[in-house]
Amino acid sequence: MIATAAFVIAFLVVGVTVVALAFGGGPRGARRNLHGQSRSNNRVAITATVLATIAFGAGIPVAVIAANTDNQSKQAPGGVKLSEAQQDGRKVFAKNCSTCHTLKSANAVGKVGPDLDQLRPVAALTLNAIEEGRARGMGQMPAGLIDGEDAKHVASYVAATAGRD
Ligand code: HEC
């Protein structure tokens, strides 16, 4: 979100600078004006510059943001539509689980624990693994990494997306 805001502000600054230059015309523009170049010509050029600046300076960032918010949050591989809880679960997974587990829908490639795309755990199994941890021979998963809503959301998210592509 902060990166997006910075991007938009940078674009607006560039846009405003271009407008200012167009209106000011710089030293050369001022001299040209003194020598009586047609004012209406100038106005057309300024209007075109302003319109182009608005179109690029504001239109493109707005379009990019609109496209991103729609695509990134709801869509998961395999045409799965995520609920809000599952979208939250994706964030929780990225933060707490991706270092150890592979899960394509979260771009996670961890190799410490089992590949969740192959295991395709139902939500109850994931919840149990989170609650009690696991230590059966292929390393360890600590108990209680997360709890409450976070655990429910991540379990639902994994169940919805594991093994899809
Ligand atoms: C420190 C590494 C690590 C982290 C972090 C981790 N896991 Fe695990 N996980 C493992 C290991 C290792 C196993 C397998 C243990 C075994 O069965 O020997 C495992 C097993 C599992 C299983 C299978 C349980 C079963 O009974 O088959 C699920 C589901 C799972 N993890 C989900 C998660 C989720 C969701 C998170 C994030 C909240 C998470 N893991 C975080 C290492 C980790």
Image (spheres, grey):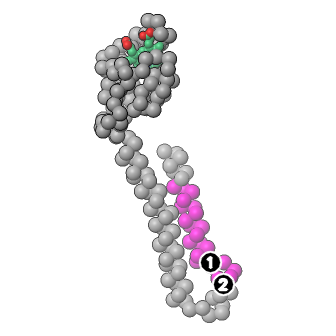
The magenta region covers 8-29
User: Residue shown at 69%/80% (left/top)?
Assistant: 27
Quick one: label 1 or label 2, which is nearer the N terminus?
A: 1
Q: Which residue is mark 2?
A: 30
Residue highlighted by disc 1 = 24
Residue 64 shows in the view: yes
Does the segment drawn in magenta span residue 142? no
Tell me how far mark 1 sits from mark 2, CA to CA. 8 Å
Residue 147 percent location from the top left of the image: 40, 19
The reply to whether discs 1 and 2 touch (Cβ–Cβ < 8 Å) is: yes
Q: Is mark 2 within 8 Å of ligand 1?
A: no
Q: Residues within 10 Å of mark 2 (few under 14, many from 20)?
A: few
66 is higher (above) or lower (below) than 54: above
Q: Residue at x 49, y 64 (%)?
A: 56
Q: What residue type is disc 1 on?
A: Gly
Q: Main secondary structure of the magenta part?
A: helix
Q: Determine whether the residue tagged by mark 2 lies in a helix, strand or loop.
A: helix
Residue 9 sits in which quadrant?
bottom right
**Mark 1 residue CB less than 8 A from any atom of ligand 1:** no
Lateral position of residue 132 relative to residue 44, left or right: left
Q: Of 138 and 19, which appears nearest the observer?
A: 138
Give the total of numbered labels: 2
